[in-house]
Amino acid sequence: MTIVEIIDAHQGFNLVTNNITTRKPRTLLWAIGLVTFFLSSVLDNLTCTIAMVSLLRKLVPPSEFRKLLGAVVVIAANAGGAWTPIGDVTTTMLWIHGQISTLQTMKDLFVPSAVSLAVPLALMSLTSEVNGKGQDSSNVMASEQMAPQGLLVFFVGIGALIFVPVFKALTGLPPFMGILLGLGVLWILTDAIHYGESEKQKLKVPQALSRIDTQAVLFFLGILLSVSSLEAAGILRELANFLDAHIPSNEMIACVIGVVSAIIDNVPLVAATMGMYDLTSFPQDSQFWQLIAYCASTGGSMLVIGSAAGVAFMGMEKVDFFWYLRKVSGFAFAGYVAGIAAYLAIHNLPISLSTTVAQVPFLSGS
């Protein structure tokens, strides 16, 4: 959170947002979706949503189309967070506790996550809001300039975030040590850049630490303590037994948890699931854990209150619950189901890709 705050203070995200200049509605829809998808794979969904919705305010005048683009940001942020261990709080929790690994998760969940975004984008491209007249570019505001050395801070900050899984793989040390090392490097860098500039205090780490959302950290702490209490009391084990007895397949359980995450915050849901099932029930990188990572992240897009990204969008653009339900929820649900179908198709096809390749004469060398 501190690293992202430092990048934001230097207007580092303008490197990404200032390069989106198209005014064609359909092109803009896909550009916003794809940029958000990849940006949220290394940033938390909330920061990514705030940055992209702020960009939309400069690109598009207030309209129904801008609200639709904001909804695309929510769907793309949640989808982008599902396929990397640092893209979403829930995937990070699963990664830290050993339920999923870095490369396997990225390899297995990238296609389902991309499908869960591509399907809503394709369907939205057919709507009247997107096919209407082009946007009036006279309403577009001027791009903000980066702070001094903002480009350097952006690349070092993003590099520090991406470095965390590499650090864990190389050293075997806990991820928090990797992120603190990255923060230390960024701290030294910003102090060196702004040395002797008293008016640039807000660009330094101590000021950034005072601006981070401490309430969110305490919220997650409270959730994890509550879930641990339920686990210690044996209630989560009983719930797991109930689900196993009444729901026929593990994949179905994961899908149901994803649907519930549209109503209930996904962090307690995933924490509870980790308490209900241990690594002896489902080993690392099993289909169950990967589906939990995918479903809990993308399921929140189905309702505007289902994710931190949705709640931020609702506050920034004054979108109400029923507008989102009427205009967006159907598209988000279609993407959610299509992503699950893509995952199951890739993993359960009777003939694997390697077998198919081996049967092609000129590829197998026979």
Image (tube, rainbow, N blue to C red):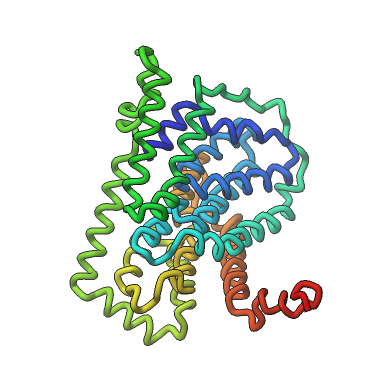
The C terminus, quarter of image = bottom right
Q: Is residue 249 above or below residue 293?
A: below
Q: Position of residue 155 (x, y in %)?
A: 51, 34
Q: Which quadrant of the structure image shows residue 305?
A: bottom left
Instruction: Name the residue rendered at 60%, 34% in the picture.
Output: 17
Whether residue 332 is visible to the viewer of this picture, yes or no, is: no
Q: How many badges with numbers are in the image?
A: 0
- In the image shown, does 265 or 355 lie closer to the viewer? 355
Instruction: Name the residue rendered at 45%, 67% in the picture.
Output: 292
Q: Is residue 174 above or below residue 295?
A: above
Q: Position of residue 256 (x, y in %)?
A: 46, 72
The N terminus, quarter of image = top left
The residue most toward the front is 366
Instruction: Name the residue rendered at 44%, 62% in the picture.
Output: 101
Q: Which quadrant of the structure image shows residue 160?
A: top left
The residue most toward the right is 362
- In the image shown, does 203 or 257 lie closer to the viewer? 203
Query: Is 107 on the left-hand or right-hand side of 216?
Result: right
Instruction: Name the residue rendered at 58%, 75% in the picture.
Output: 347
Q: Position of residue 30 (x, y in %)?
A: 68, 48
Query: Is 123 on the left-hand or right-hand side of 297?
Result: right
Q: Position of residue 61 (x, y in %)?
A: 64, 33
Query: Is 306 on the left-hand or right-hand side of 33?
Result: left
Q: Which quadrant of the structure image shows residue 212?
A: top left
Whether residue 44 is visible to the viewer of this picture, yes or no, is: yes
- In the image shown, does 225 or 286 lie closer to the viewer? 286
